[in-house]
Amino acid sequence: MNTTAFRGLLILILGGALAFRAAGLDLRPMHHDEANQALKFGLLLEKGEYRYDKTDHHGPSLYYLSLPLAKALGKNTLAALDETTLRLVPVLFGTGIILLFLLFLPDSGYAAILFAGLYAALSPALVYYSRFYIQEMVFVFFVMGWLGALWRYLRKPAAGWAAAAGFFGGMMFATKETSVIIFAASGAAFILAKAVQKKEPSAARHKTSRFRVPHLVLGFGLAALTAALFFSSFFANPKGILDSMAAFSGYFGKAASPGYHVHPPLYYFGLLTYAKSGGLVWSEALILALAFLGIFAGLRKRSAMILFLAVNALLAAAVFSLIPYKTPWNLLPFYAGFILLAGYGTAYLFESLRRNRRMAPAVVLLIIGVVHLGWQSRQANFRTFADPRNPWVYAQTIPDFLKLIGRVNGIAEVAPAGKNILIKVVSDPDETWPLPWYLRGYNQVGYWTDWKAAGDFKNIPLVIASPDQAAGFDTLLKDHYQIEYYGLRPDVLLALFIRQDLWDEYLNRRK
């Protein structure tokens, strides 16, 4: 394949990946984690304020990286923000991962990069979370940049690659605390790949493969500076740097006491290989099978690059799998490495079959597998985006919740106070989000976790409560309020209390 053909095909893959990720970004209701991140970003957008929270929310990079896009689209306030604007950030970083595969091009070849790019473009897991306003896809982008720069440095040490590795490493750390897992896994992979590289024939080695202390100082220094800039809110909050280190005690505690998020060790690989629920079957086993073929091929060829990628992916997968606390998106940092290995495995497969003149059946099977990936991705993102039968849906807000928001908006339109209508929300925090996001345009909203602390309920225009809290005061309101129930998440309800005069006016306006 010549360079022109490669570039043309890569552009097509990138365009397809971007289009697939960017279409209909407002279809899925905001997840409570997305809503949390959105309000944190809204404070930075409106007031320029950000303080790293060592107990939750992860690192600051997502918020600062969201600023340029929001400003470019003319979104200067929290109320002006929308789902599309926010989710375009992970869309761009999720697509950019394919470009970072190019860092491995000199040792993998055109075919491997194109196949890996195709799998990344269509993977249901990668596409779904590229449409999700949380840190994960930004994190995966920096992980791939870190691995690519580290490999290029190992291949041929140079100050530029040391600086690139430092920047990507600093951004990893400034994005998510789980970066320490990747640092450990890639460090082991680096050492083993270095040992293999020394045993390669002299023609395959680079004569400049020695480490240089100034390069290490440059890399570590740039990583520390990059992370410090973000955690300190660009030196407006120096304490954030210390908090970034103190945060690990809290996250270790969460890992040891996962509560709702506890899952068995093989949870991630179960999601990827075979997930069946309610008659729907999901599988990305094709990618995993080709990845392990890539590992086999690389080891057979004594490829230091494949050893580097394989050790990192396998060690990271093992650590993430052994931690009891699991959410589906946590598999992405190691799965992206498997996708790159799958590209190499596919190229090896076709190279082997071409020599044996058995290409046609493999091409047909691969086309079927790729089409199946694309079909699953379409189902996951445009059909079952909030359906618990979709393995990538996790504690997702259901569409019925949007009916509650629609009702609140409808009542506000007929209320004399309009957007200044008083709304009391009484619920446990887990049953409150993403209400603050959807009520961000209202000026008189109060939140309580206990109805006894919420004060007098008489004449309050709207009250939203979880059923257990509503049980404490619904007898006080039922004769003067219309009461409706809406789903928040599967098996989680919210009660909406509408003052009778507003309800009557609402009905009259609809006639």
Image (cartoon, helix red, strand yellow):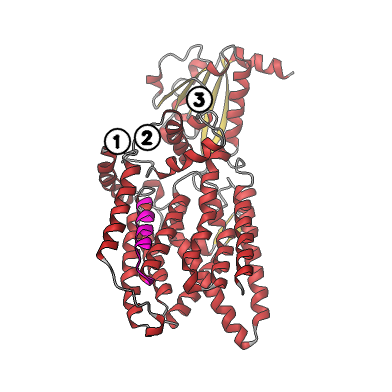
User: What is the x, y in percent for residue 4?
Assistant: 63, 68
Q: Is residue 328 left or right of residue 131?
A: left
Q: Which residue is mark 1?
A: 237
Residue 159 on the magenta segment: yes
Q: Disc 1 or 2, which lies upstream in sequence?
A: 2
Q: Which residue is mark 3?
A: 464
**Contact (Cβ within 8 Å) of mark 3 with mark 1:** no
When asked about the image quadrant of residue 64, the answer is: top left
Question: Residue at horizontal 52%, vertical 37%?
Answer: 70
Which numbered circle lies on residue 50? 2
80, above or below 58, in the image:
above
How crowded pointer 3 is (Cα within 10 Å; few <14, some 14-19, many 20+) is rated as many
Secondary structure of residue under mark 1: loop
Question: Residue at horizontal 47%, vertical 66%?
Answer: 338
Residue 323 on the magenta segment: no
Q: From which residue to which does the magenta span run? A: 155-171
User: What is the x, y in percent for residue 220?
Assistant: 29, 56
Q: Residue furthest bottom?
A: 356
Q: Amino acid at mark 3?
A: Ile
**Contact (Cβ within 8 Å) of mark 1 with mark 2:** yes
Q: Disc 2 or 3, which lies upstream in sequence?
A: 2
How crowded pointer 2 is (Cα within 10 Å; few <14, some 14-19, many 20+) is rated as many
| Quadrant of image for the C terminus | top right
Secondary structure of residue under mark 3: strand
